[in-house]
Image (cartoon, rainbow, N blue to C red):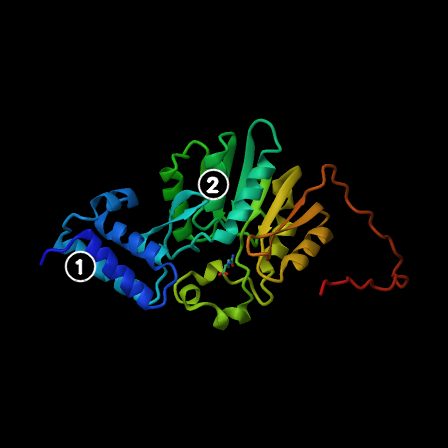
Amino acid sequence: MTITYQDLYLKARNALSGAGIEGAQLEAREILCAAAGKSPEQLYRDLSLYTTEAIAEKTEALLARRLAGEPVAYIVGEWSFCGLPFYVSPAALIPRIDTEMLAQLVMNRLKEYEGHTRVLDLCAGSGCIGLTAAAYLKNTRAVLVDLSDGALDLCKRNIRRHKLTGRAVYLKGDALQAPSHALGQFDVLVSNPPYIPSGDFPSLDASVKDFEPLMALDGGEDGLDFYRAITKLWMPALKPGGHLLYEVGIGQAEKVAWLLVKAGYENIRITRDTGGIDRVVEGQRPKEWEAPDLLHTVPGEEPPAEETPEPQ
Ligand code: GLN
């Protein structure tokens, strides 16, 4: 049987749209490109050519995985973020379009400085945030930190892919522990940490719950474990005046902003994503850091404990 790339493409597209997949057209193209080892441009050029039995079989196999619910990004092994291609694997979250806002704000903050800048991407996953900054800003050096070996392997491959070996490094580290002094200090610390409250897992989308790594999603009981730890423990890794930027989940922005207030950060800002959701929380380490006055009391004469107001 002789079939063209066009036949294969239409078959894949129809199967995907028949299964209710929204981006059927785009996904059919991605799957066919991966099966044929072609770029989208090469595929469009070759649409009327005959394909091979091997490519047809490979397309079928990839399509079957997609129809079983696996995200297309894992099937094809890469995904685009801020206009750049990144390798992805089930060891890290697939870069989200919501996160592009965070990367953009990181670059805006880095551009406030003249000369060389350093950005630390904590819980880096594929490394897409820190590497986007390094790829677009030639004076920026990026350090990518993650606890997962699988994520660090992706970071390594993405550093090479974007020819950033001279300006980007990856390191194993735990965001819940204080950083080593050897890391030095940064102009910007950015993190898209795990932030889903543990109890919310059953309600997550199947494509997330069944395929993406739990370790990258689980933010503890209220989803805020990483924000609490990083805000407090990692401030010494910021230069005075340095910026801390977080991606947060729906309904978390004010609580996270409050953590920053309590830790002494200044110029706290919340920014919405394109979907109108409060998505990025940021603050600045004070330029001149003064230890707060300590209250000296005589035993037995402690003032009544102050209620710390919690945001609703
Ligand atoms: N935004 C992701 C989701 O909704 C979660 C990302 C995270 O926990 N950092 O699945």
Amino acid type at image mark 1: Glu
Quadrant location of the C terminus in the rendered image:
bottom right
The numbered mark at residue 148 is none
Relative vertical location of residue 2 with respect to residue 289 in this rendering, above or below: below
Relative side of 35 to 191, left or right: left
Relative image position of residue 85 (x, y in whole percent): 38, 44
- Residue ID at (52%, 33%): 140
Relative image position of residue 113 (x, y in whole percent): 61, 31
Q: Nearer the viewer, residue 120 or 131?
A: 131
Quadrant location of the N terminus in the rendered image:
bottom left
Residue 25: quarter of image: bottom left
- Residue ID at (38%, 51%): 88
Residue 38 visible here: no
- Please give the residue where the numbered disc 2 appears in the rendered image: 132
Q: Nearer the viewer, residue 289 or 95?
A: 95
Q: Is disc 2 placed on a helix, strand or loop?
A: helix
Residue 285: quarter of image: top right
Relative image position of residue 13 (x, y in whole percent): 29, 60
Which residue is outermost to the left? 1
Residue count near mark 2 (Cα–Cα under 10 Å), binned few <14, some 14–19, many ≥20: many
Precedes in sequence: disc 1 or disc 2:
1
Q: Nearer the viewer, residue 80 or 299?
A: 80
Which residue is outermost to the front? 48
- Please give the residue where the numbered disc 1 appears in the rendered image: 57
Amino acid type at image mark 2: Thr
Residue 5 visible here: yes
Relative side of 26 to 251, left or right: left
Given contact means CB atoms under 8 Å apart, are the residues at marks 1 and 2 in contact? no
Q: Is disc 1 placed on a helix, strand or loop?
A: helix
